[in-house]
Structures are given as structure tokens and as C-alpha cells.
Image (spheres, grey):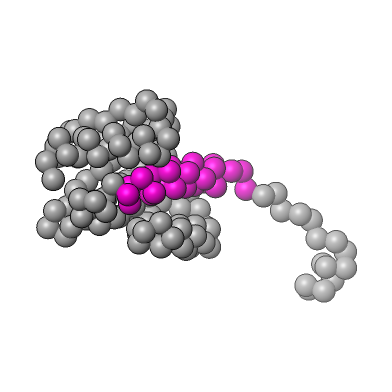
């Protein structure tokens, strides 16, 4: 799969996914696709393993990944969606800043996998930004009865 093939594939993927003005460029062997003002996807092809990776930056995070429960719940949901969209696998970087989608890139499979996965990836990045920037829920004071029962 040469640079021209990737460029053509990304243009078709963007069109299929519904993005009209997508910019794609290559830098140091990595393809960068700008989906919108907030979402940039880095595409990396790993020919030896037959995989294509699409990584989106969820933004600078204040508290790394938020609570462990939220992280696990999000990844389980994403991987459930992944299985439903053609066997894609999603992962979260250890610092919680990047979400990666892995897909097989057999020539016909890569295009379909990315077209199915990129909208989910962009949506999840947006959701993840929201989860991580949401203010913590204020603690509710306990009623007198609850205070007595907990003592």
C-alpha cells in the first residue's frame, strides 16, 4: 500500500464517514487527517503485522484518565462497538490522552473498517474530553438518619 493508495483511501473514507472538508497529509511516515477543528487523526500503517492504526488525541488531561471505572466502562463500550463494526479494536493510551483504533488493512478491509471506525473514534474522543473536563459532582451532605446509620 503506497502513499497514493493511502491518500485515495483516506479521501474515500472521509467521504463515506460524512466529512466534507478533510485535510490529509503525510509527515515522517505518519498520515494525519484533520476531521474538524478539534479532532486530528494520525494514521499509521504497520505492514508487517497487517494492521492500520488510527489515533486521536483526546486532549490534555488534568487527572490522567479520570476514575478507573469510567476508563474500563468506556473501553468495554468502545470494544463492543468495535466488534459490531467489523472486528476493530480500540485502546486507550496509559495516560488517557489518546484513543487508538486498530483495524486489519487487507486492501478491501481497511477502507470499510476505517469508514466504520473513524466516526466512532471521533465521537468517543469528544465524549472522553467531556468526561475528563466535567467538574466533579459536589458531595451531597448526608441526612441525619444516614449519619447515624454510618457511624
Q: Quadrant of residue 28?
A: top left
Q: Give the main secondary structure of the magenta stretch.
A: helix
Residue 138, placed above or below residue 86: above
Q: Tell me what residue is drawn at x 17 percent, y 52 percent.
A: 46
Number of labelled discs?
0
Q: Residue at x 16, y 60 (%)?
A: 49
Q: Residue furthest top?
A: 21
Residue closest to the eye, 11 or 118: 11
User: Which portion, as a residue range, is magenta?
Assistant: 112-136
Residue placed most toward the observer, 90 or 107: 107
- Dividing the picture into quarters, in which one does residue 37 lie? top left
The residue shown at (24%, 51%) is: 108
> What is the x, y in percent for residue 120?
44, 48
Is residue 8 in view from this perspective? Answer: yes
Residue 130 at what x, y percent from top left? 54, 42
| 62 in the magenta segment | no
Amino acid at each position: 500500500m503506497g502513499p497514493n493508495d493511502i491518500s485515495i483511501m483516506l479521501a474515500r473514507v472521509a467521504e463515506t464517514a460524512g466529512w466534507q472538508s478533510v485535510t490529509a497529509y503525510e509527515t515522517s511516515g505518519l498520515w494525519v487527517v484533520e476531521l474538524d477543528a478539534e479532532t486530528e487523526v494520525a494514521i499509521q500503517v504497520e505492514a508487517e503485522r497487517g494492521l492500520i492504526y488510527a489515533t486521536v488525541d483526546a486532549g490534555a488531561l488534568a487527572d490522567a484518565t479520570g476514575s478507573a471505572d469510567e476508563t474500563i466502562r468506556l473501553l468495554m463500550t468502545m470494544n463492543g462497538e468495535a466488534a459490531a463494526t467489523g472486528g476493530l479494536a480500540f485502546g486507550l493510551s496509559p495516560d488517557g490522552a489518546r484513543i487508538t483504533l486498530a483495524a486489519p488493512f487487507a486492501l478491501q478491509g481497511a477502507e470499510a473498517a476505517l469508514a466504520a471506525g473513524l466516526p466512532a473514534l471521533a465521537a468517543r474522543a469528544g465524549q472522553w474530553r467531556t468526561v475528563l473536563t466535567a467538574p466533579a459532582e459536589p458531595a451531597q451532605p448526608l441526612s441525619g438518619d444516614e449519619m447515624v446509620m454510618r457511624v
